Amino acid sequence: MFCLPQQESTTPTTCTGSASTQDMESGYGDGLQGECLRKPDQTQPKLYGVGDPTATFSSDSSCLSSRGRVIKWFWDSAEEGYRTYHMDEYDEDKNPSGIINLGTSENKLCFDLLSWRLTQGDMLHVEPSLLQYPDWRGHLFLREEVAKFLSFYCKSPAPLKPENVVVLNGCASLFSALATVLCEAGEALLIPTPYYGAITQHIYLYGNVRLAYVYLDSKVTGLNTRPFQLTVEKLEMALQGVSSEGVKVKGLILINPQNPLGDVYSPEELQDFLRFAMRHKLHVIMDEVYMLSVFEESLGYRSVLSLERLPDPQRTHVMWATSKDFGMSGLRFGVLYTENQHVATAVASLCRYHGLSGLVQHQMAQLLRDHDWISQVYLPENHARLKAAHTYVSEELRALGIPFVSRGAGFFIWVDLRKYLCKGTFEEEALLWRQFLDNKVLLSSGKTFECKEPGWFRVVFSDKENRLRLGMQRMRQVLEGQSQVVEDASPCHTQEPQSQPR
């Protein structure tokens, strides 16, 4: 396990998009003087866009329906790195030359704590009702525990109600269900970029719903601004632009804490975004799947459920899961909290396809009610381990002179590798991604998060020390070689991406 340094700087680094990295009082710069190789683009920045998930679609699967061909194409085109990793997964003893996965956002630091808790006697229980069809919203005993859990850890001003809870097998299913019941086919949901790229699949494959992008950039324009900062002005401009192209926007997706930026929205920002949505009669889908993975207390994270009064509670829908905060991505447990009973009932109807077994529901109820273990054992140790791993990777990046964005939430650091691209294109970004994979380290590139600036990568740090050290060593090898390529101004080749972030 990593050891925390006695004095650790909590001030992360970022490239501001100017000629050099600046020491910003906003909390992003740490004095790292990394030079950017290109001048900022002087053309008019693109403020919005509408996703076309099948723009490059092609298929020879004649035995499938048109929908089936699109679904298969998504798997073939977007999962390459993830599939490659599973065919050549690193193992210290069995496959030491295998791929280190720093691309998939999973917490692999606390298996010892979780395995102990999940094998206690209260978890091992069977009764007839657990083996029979449940209420599709989830067993009442579980929804009661979820309501109590969210009330306590989200610090809601009033107790949350179990009738507003729906449980299903993960947030991927929840995104899919919400998009299907809130939007007509061809309509769109507004989302700031960069964002967790798999949402594209989640909302499109069943509901044929698209994403409308609010493009953010890394430029810092003042002391009170930060890289990739979302504002109401940017939301208004994007909504106006998308609507002018004839695309109907039905809602807004906000991820808080944000993936891949590791950022959090302040209560004031949340209220501003919610009021924007209310003015335009937009649903708001709040993804708070990392809410208990904020390891820098100074961030002051606030759940939307902690706000005294929601501007439009009937159009505000909150999701959470155990996949991230409890390191259980393979268990598949997700939660929707909404006061809109029409939405809750429609999503619950789809839970017959996305439900949880009764035995898992019992286990989750036992886990969520154990506030003593969660608050006194699990969360403090989990935060300490996340902070130590984050510190190690941050220091490695600083040693390489690499700017990055990370504020102390989530499992990842948003890394600026633009200086390793000769011409600053997405083709070069894809080639660099391929070089990492060929050198047996899997990362997620900015294109898969719809980042409009080529050269950004997400690096996941929530892994064991031996794998992190080897992964960073392999990254360093690639970057040292690429530095020489840039320095020599050698021709840069292109190659198609890539791996879908998870």
Image (spheres, helix red, strand yellow):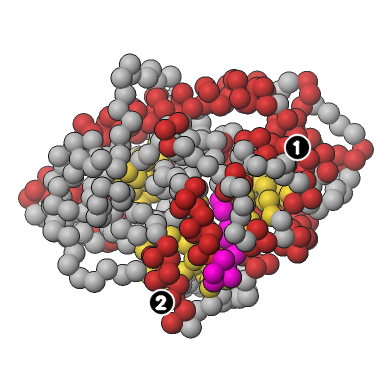
Relative to 470, 108 lies left or right: right
Residue occupying image coordinates x 24% and y 71%:
44
Tell me the tag on residue 145.
1
Mark 1 secondary-structure assignment = helix
The disc at residue 479 is none
Is tag 1's residue or tag 2's residue first in the polypeptide sequence? Answer: 1
Percent across and percent down for residue 298 are 42, 33
In depth, the one of 149 and 305 nearer the eye is 305
Q: Amino acid at mark 2?
A: Gly
Image point 74% across, 49% down: which residue? 165
- Name the outermost residue toward the right: 128
Which one is nearer the viewer's eye here, 323 or 6?
Answer: 6
Amino acid type, callout 1: Glu
Residue 376 in the magenta stretch? The answer is no
Residue 340 coordinates in the image, percent (x, y): 72, 60
Mark 1 to mark 2 CA distance (whole Å): 43 Å
Residue 181 seen by the camera: yes
Q: Nearer the viewer, residue 196 or 479?
A: 196
- Which contiguous range is marked in magenta? 278-287
Q: Farthest residue in the left direction?
A: 488
Q: Which residue is mark 2?
A: 241
Residue drawn where x is 49% and y is 47% of the image: 267
**Kind of element beneath mark 2:** helix
Q: Relative to 83, is 18 on the left or the right?
A: left
Residue 502 appears at what percent x and percent y? 49, 48
Answer with the quarter of the image where residue 423 lies. bottom left
Which residue is found at the position 26% from the left and 47% from the top?
A: 223
Quadrant (top left, top right, bottom left, bottom right) of the N terminus? top left
Decide if residue 164 is on the left or right side of residue 429: right
